[in-house]
Image (cartoon, helix red, strand yellow):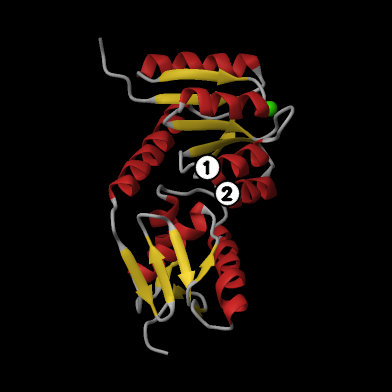
Amino acid sequence: MEKSLGKVLVVEDESKLARFIELELRHEGYDVVLAEDGRVGIEKFYEEEPDIILLDLMLPELNGIEVCRRLRKESDVPIIMLTAKGETMDKIAGLDSGADDYITKPFAIEELFARMRVALRRSANSNDNNGNVLTLHDLKIDISRRMVYYKDNEVELTKREFELLTYLVKNKNIVISREQILNQVWGYDYIGETNVVDVYVRYLRTKIDDKFGVKLIHTIRGVGYFVKDDE
Ligand code: CA
């Protein structure tokens, strides 16, 4: 028997689409579990312990953003949101709720597979990190435990905010362009609004700079962002 590429939980209420995705995934070599609404999706997550979740945004019972938010409190499982055309603001909200990525329907199945491989690889890499702590002034990032502290105050970040902050701190004193950030933090040739980076920098500033009265993330207009380790 061939080895499974992993178990995928597909939370999608359009049964035709769900069935199509299921068949394609099985053909590719994944195990598949289906859930037809948000509540069942959360139940199946606990029962089945999938390696990755494909999560429709518009769902009966609990919508995708709410499902994502709840799962993120418990787990770092990779989540890819399935969104319909024109749901741009919802996409941003989806990423803020902790999704790793999103893909717009209708999509090419090969593109979905590519996104899944990236998300699964990133998740495997982050599980390999252990005992890694980064510091910058009074900021401390515990990479293995995914915790951030400022002067011993815990800073609660979403998964993507955490990854953005970690990337900036790892590259301290270097100005990093939005495109580099997109490639490294979002992890693929991102097609869409590069202002998603600005949105996330703003989230981080609200949670760290504004809250603790510091200037951590600097903007170089028209170029990008950086953090520096001398005041
Ligand atoms: Ca739907």
Which quadrant of the figure shows ligand 1? top right
**Disc nearer the start of the sequence (2/1):** 1
Which residue matches tag 2?
A: 95
Residue 104 image label: none
Q: Quadrant of the C terminus?
A: bottom left
Compared across the picture, whether 140 is left or right of 20 comes to: left
Compared across the picture, whether 74 is left or right of 146 comes to: right
Residue 178 in sight here: no
Count of numbered labels shown in the rendering: 2
Q: Quadrant of the N terminus?
A: top left
Which residue matches tag 1?
A: 74
Ligand 1 within 8 Å of disc 2? The answer is: no
- The residue at the point 27 percent across, 18 percent down is 3
Residue 62 in sight here: yes
Q: Position of residue 19 (x, y in %)?
A: 56, 14
Which quadrant would residue 208 be assigned to in this image?
A: bottom right
Rendered view: 100 above or below 114: below
- The residue at the point 51 percent across, 59 percent down is 161
- The residue at the point 60 percent across, 30 percent down is 42
Q: Amino acid at mark 2?
A: Leu
Q: Position of residue 4 (x, y in %)?
A: 32, 20
Q: Position of residue 79 (x, y in %)?
A: 51, 38
Which quadrant would residue 65 be assigned to in this image?
A: top right
